[in-house]
Amino acid sequence: MFQDIKAAIFDMDGTLTDSMWVWEKIDIDYLKKRNIPVPKNLSESIAHLTFEESAQYFKNKFNLKDNIKTIMDEWNNMAYYEYVHNVKLKNGALDFLMLLKNKGIKLGLATSNCDMLLKIALKNNGIYDIFDCITTSDEVNKSKEFPDIYLLCAERLNISPKHCIVFEDILPAIRGAKSAGMRVVGVHDMSAKNQKKEIIKNADFYILEYNELIKAV
């Protein structure tokens, strides 16, 4: 799996951190506050979007009067407490990151989350400084179904896409990373359980926990 791999690029929410539940809770609480019914599969519909695109999706779909910035600010405020106190790494993630680092493999982060929350999550879990590069979807103005965020991360790492392996938890992002010419590991997350069959089909590998990969590096 790691033959010729010189860089590993990780998504954060749902891949490195057990945090998708935060956003599912925010979606529900935000809409309930406005007496708006929560559509089925809402989380799946927006999981691959940039933060701003998600806000635009909400504004259009639910005919919200607030502007995009106001929506995003409210979401960030709702998420802040959980990211400070309750967002933790997935099982085996820290050991796996350290193993890759010790093997000389460069580490990149490619996330749709905002700068404030990603810093909180990474610093609280002691892994902020482990990454050689951090890239956000807002920097490329495209969602993760496109290859742009992964290509930018690889460029900053100064590693050819063919020597990169990406870790993602949702189907559109896995397809986006594949279209960048990179190998992809699908990481199990309950928020994407309905996509599991297609994720396994599209990813090069699929894992339930990072401990499965310790011997592969």
Image: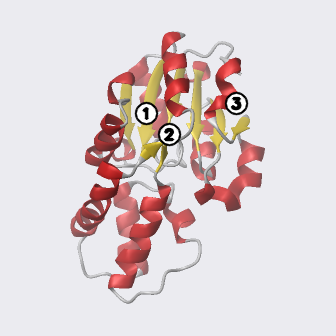
Q: Residues within 10 Å of mark 3 (few under 14, many from 20)?
A: few
x then y, percent, for residue 125: 37, 36
Distance from label 3 to label 1 (Cα)?
Answer: 21 Å
Q: Give the SS element for disc 2.
A: loop
Q: Which residue is mark 2?
A: 16
In the rendered structure, find residue 66 and report the number of the disc placed on it: none
Q: Kindly indicate the quadrant of the structure image that contains residue 74.
A: bottom left
Residue 122 vs residue 91: left or right? left
Give the amino acid type for the residue marked by disc 2 in the picture. Answer: Leu
Picture residue at 63% right of the left edge, 45% below the top:
175
Q: Residues within 10 Å of mark 1 (few under 14, many from 20)?
A: many
Tag nearer the camera, 2 or 1? 2
Front residue of 164/80: it is: 80
Give the amino acid type for the residue marked by disc 1 in the picture. Answer: Leu
Residue 163 vs residue 12: left or right? right
Q: Which residue is mark 3?
A: 212
x then y, percent, for residue 117: 30, 48
Picture residue at 26% right of the left edge, 82% below the top:
65
Q: Which residue is mark 1?
A: 109
Where's the C terminus, which quadrant?
top right
Above or below, 14 against 76 in this view is above
Picture residue at 47% right of the left edge, 39% below the top:
148
For marks 2 and 3 on the same chain, the one whose residue lies earlier in the sequence: 2
Q: Residues within 10 Å of mark 2 (few under 14, many from 20)?
A: many
Residue 207 seen in the current view: yes
Residue 132 seen in the current view: no
Callout 2–callout 1 Cβ contact below 8 Å? yes
Where's the N terminus, which quadrant?
top right
For marks 3 and 1 on the same chain, the one whose residue lies earlier in the sequence: 1
Above or below, 97 against 50 in this view is above
Picture residue at 39% right of the left edge, 60% below the top:
53
